[in-house]
Image (tube, helix red, strand yellow):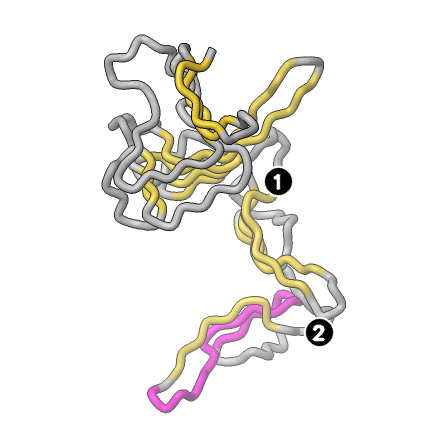
C-alpha cells in the first residue's frame, strides 16, 4: 500500500512510494545525482534488476557502466581483473523442446579482446566456428556487382585454409581466377620506381605459367 502519494484532482498518482519500498513516478527529473541498486553490503539477490526501462530512453550526457567517471559518450569499466571478465556481450537464445540454449555471438572482454562466437578469445580478435564441419568460412570479404551478384574476394576457413576469390580452398593458400580469359595473372610481385612506373618482377597465371619480369609467360 502507498505511504506517500502525489496525485492530481482525479487521484491519478504522479509519484508514489509504497510500504514495500517501491517507488513509481509519471516523470522524474534529477538535477544532481541518482543512485539505483543495492549497496555492497546488501543481502538482496544480485539477480534482482536494479533498473528496468520500458520505452525510449535518451541520455544527453556521458554514460558509464561500472564507473562514475565515464570518459566517452558510453564507457564500460570491468569490475574484476579476471581475463574472462566480459565487458560487452551479444547473444541469442533458442527454445528447443522447452530447453533454452544461449549462443554467444559477439564479446569484448576486459583485456580488450574481441571474440566472434566465443567468450574465450585467445588473441586480440578471435573467430570460432559454430560448427564441427570442415572447410566452413570463418571470415570473408566480398563485393556486389551492379547487377546484384555477390562475389568472394578473400576467405579463411575453419580448417585454416586461405582463399583468394574462392570459398573452397583446396590447399592452405588458394588463388582462384575470377576470369575465364586465357593466361591471366593470378599472383604477381612488383615494384614501383620513384617516378611512379610499375614493373612486374614475378607472376603466376591461371594456366600455371610462371613469369619473371613479365605478366604474360608463354610456358
Which of the two discs, 2 and 1, sits closer to the camera? 1
Residue at image point 24% right, 13% down: 41
Mark before the other along the chain sequence, 2 or 1: 1
Q: Quadrant of the C terminus?
A: bottom right
Residue placed furthest toward the right: 147
Query: Does 199 sit above or below residue 159?
Result: below
Camera sees residue 175: no
| Left or right: where 138 falls relative to 114 | right
Residue placed furthest toward the top: 43
Query: Does 51 sit above or below residue 184?
Result: above
| Foreground of the two, 71 or 35 | 35
Q: Label 1, on which residue?
A: 135
| Left or right: where 119 falls relative to 156 | left
Query: Does 209 sit above or below residue 12?
Result: below
Residue 40: mark in rendering:
none
Magenta part of the chain: 194-212
Distance between the Cα atoms at labels 2 and 1?
29 Å
Q: Label 2, on which residue?
A: 182
Residue 138 x/y as whole percent = 55, 43
| Foreground of the two, 32 or 49 | 32
Amino acid at each position: 500500500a502507498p505511504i506517500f502519494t502525489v496525485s492530481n484532482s482525479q487521484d491519478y498518482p504522479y509519484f508514489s512510494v509504497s510500504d514495500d519500498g517501491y517507488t513509481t513516478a509519471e516523470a522524474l527529473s534529477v538535477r544532481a545525482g541518482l543512485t539505483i541498486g543495492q549497496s555492497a553490503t546488501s543481502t538482496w539477490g544480485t539477480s534482482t534488476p536494479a533498473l528496468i526501462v520500458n520505452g525510449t530512453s535518451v541520455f544527453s550526457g556521458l554514460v558509464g557502466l561500472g564507473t562514475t567517471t565515464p570518459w566517452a559518450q558510453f564507457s564500460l569499466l570491468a569490475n574484476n581483473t579476471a581475463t574472462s571478465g566480459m565487458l560487452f556481450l551479444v547473444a541469442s537464445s533458442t527454445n528447443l523442446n522447452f530447453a533454452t540454449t544461449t549462443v554467444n555471438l559477439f564479446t569484448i572482454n576486459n583485456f580488450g579482446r574481441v571474440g566472434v562466437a566465443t567468450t574465450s578469445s585467445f588473441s586480440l580478435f578471435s573467430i570460432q566456428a559454430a560448427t564441427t564441419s570442415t572447410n566452413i568460412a570463418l571470415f570473408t570479404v566480398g563485393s556486389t556487382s551492379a547487377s546484384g551478384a555477390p562475389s568472394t574476394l578473400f576467405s579463411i576457413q575453419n580448417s585454416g585454409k586461405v582463399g583468394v576469390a574462392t570459398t573452397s580452398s583446396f590447399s592452405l593458400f588458394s588463388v582462384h581466377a575470377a576470369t575465364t580469359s586465357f593466361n591471366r595473372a593470378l599472383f604477381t610481385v612488383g615494384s614501383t620506381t620513384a617516378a611512379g612506373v610499375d614493373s612486374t618482377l614475378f607472376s603466376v597465371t591461371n594456366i600455371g605459367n610462371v613469369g619473371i619480369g613479365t605478366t604474360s609467360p608463354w610456358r
